């Protein structure tokens, strides 16, 4: 999930919902049939860009009641938080490898991007309780007992440029915790890279479906070692098949124009929106005839500051959106048959 327009820390559940409406991107867990938080603002709000200061971040962590805050560095990244050194080193290594794989993948496809020219900051929490303290949200078990339909479990904040994750291995009863750690870091790390390599504009307007489509495109990673970007996202493909049984296909023009589809309503519809966003980006990146069109489209929207020309930009560079919708449906069937 990408977060924008909010302070580096200290979000209430209502505050998080408003932040998502303003462009927060991230990773969440949800229960189908329950409602996701309602976004408090639907209008586009200019994003105030102010990179987080490491010393201020440390103070915010301590003010939130988080003990044992420390730092570790790697070539491109600085990790701050209360997680163990072992986990911090693991996350730093994952992010460094993701950056190498991401830059190689997009450059090979002709995208004009460059390695980040500044140190990227990661907030790495010991568990979901520390993460919840910082964002003023309940822990995952508490959220489940309260009937909360969707709970943020990772976030990238465009305004502060902070990536936030926690160690799933310390969450009670969490299965496949190592896989969840890799998947969450890959999703949030891809968000951070898209906004720091020139692919997307941190202070500009981009459809949430494109932002989250790119985040989910980067999700599938091996637990250890290099991992090619653009692999089939089995989780999102499975969700696409599963939730199409209970929710209608979301027209592409709606997915591009209406950010609230990925932010509020029944979790089933939100999850389907994420799955379709992944399918869109995967199609545009993996079908050679479409990749140049996607390059031109992203170059065009980098200039935008408001959502007033979203459909015009998409139509100009991607063509008839209804025809593209039909191509996406056929592509989803092709992928599902190949599983």
Image: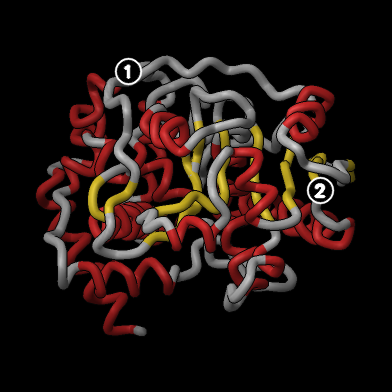
Q: Residue 323 at x, y = what percent? A: 11, 52
Tell me the element at label 2: loop
Look at 44% across and 21% down and name the residue there.
204
29 or 102: nearer the viewer:
29
296 or 18: nearer the viewer:
18
Q: Are marks 2 and 1 in contact (CB under 8 Å)?
A: no
**In this rendering, position of residue 136 left or right of residue 162:** left
The answer, for residue 288, to whether it is visible in the render is: no
Look at 79% across and 44% down and name the residue there.
81
* Quarter placement of the C terminus: bottom left
Q: Residue 96 at x, y = what percent? A: 76, 52
Q: Residue 231 at x, y = what percent? A: 49, 68
Count neighbours of disc 2 (C-alpha within 10 A) and say few if under 14, some if 14 to 19, many if 20 or more: many
Please give the residue where the numbered disc 2 appears in the rendered image: 82
Examine the rendered structure and indicate whether residue 301 appears above or below residue 164: above
Q: Which of marks 2 and 1 is nearer the N terminus?
A: 2
Q: Quadrant of residue 248?
A: bottom left
125 or 189: nearer the viewer:
125
Q: Residue 223 at x, y = what percent? A: 68, 73
**In this rendering, position of residue 308 left or right of residue 127:** left
> Mark 2 or mark 1, which is nearer to you?
2
Count neighbours of disc 1 (C-alpha within 10 A) and say few if under 14, some if 14 to 19, many if 20 or more: some
**In this rendering, position of residue 271 left or right of residue 326:** right
Examine the rendered structure and indicate whether residue 18 appears above or below residue 253: above
How many numbered markers are drawn?
A: 2
Look at 19% across and 31% down and name the residue there.
311
Tell me the element at label 1: loop
C-alpha distance separating marks 2 and 1: 38 Å
- The tag on residue 112 is none
The answer, for residue 16, to whether it is visible in the render is: yes
Please give the residue where the numbered disc 1 appears in the rendered image: 306
């Amino acid at each position: 999930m990408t977060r924008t327009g909010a302070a580096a820390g200290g979000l209430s559940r209502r505050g998080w919902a408003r932040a998502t409406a303003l462009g927060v991107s991230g990773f969440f867990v949800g229960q189908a049939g329950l409602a996701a938080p309602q976004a408090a603002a639907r209008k586009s709000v200019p994003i105030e860009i102010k990179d987080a200061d490491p010393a201020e971040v440390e103070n915010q962590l301590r003010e939130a009641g988080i003990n044992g805050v420390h730092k570790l560095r790697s070539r491109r990244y600085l990790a701050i938080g209360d997680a163990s050194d072992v986990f911090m080193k693991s996350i730093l290594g994952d992010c460094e490898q993701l950056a190498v794989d991401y830059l190689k993948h997009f450059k090979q496809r002709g995208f004009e991007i460059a390695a980040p020219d500044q140190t990227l900051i990661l907030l790495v929490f010991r568990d979901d309780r520390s993460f919840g303290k910082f964002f003023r949200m309940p822990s995952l078990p508490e959220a489940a007992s309260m009937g909360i339909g969707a709970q943020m479990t990772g976030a990238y904040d465009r305004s502060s440029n902070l990536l936030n994750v926690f160690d799933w291995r310390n969450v009670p009863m969490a299965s496949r915790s190592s896989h969840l750690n890799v998947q969450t870091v890959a999703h949030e790390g891809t968000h951070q890279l898209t906004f720091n390599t020139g692919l997307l504009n941190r202070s500009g307007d981009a459809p949430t479906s494109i932002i989250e489509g790119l985040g989910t495109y980067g999700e599938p990673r091996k637990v250890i070692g290099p991992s090619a970007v653009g692999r089939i996202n089995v989780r999102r493909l499975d969700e696409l098949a599963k939730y199409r049984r209970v929710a209608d296909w979301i027209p592409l023009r709606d997915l591009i124009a209406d950010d609230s589809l990925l932010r509020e309503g029944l979790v089933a519809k939100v999850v389907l929106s994420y799955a379709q966003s992944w399918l869109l980006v995967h199609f545009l990146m993996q079908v050679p005839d479409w990749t140049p069109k996607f390059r031109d489209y992203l170059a065009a929207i980098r200039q935008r500051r408001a959502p007033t020309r979203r459909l015009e930009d998409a139509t100009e560079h991607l063509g008839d959106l209804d025809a593209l919708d039909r191509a996406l449906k056929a592509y989803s069937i092709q992928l599902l048959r190949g599983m």
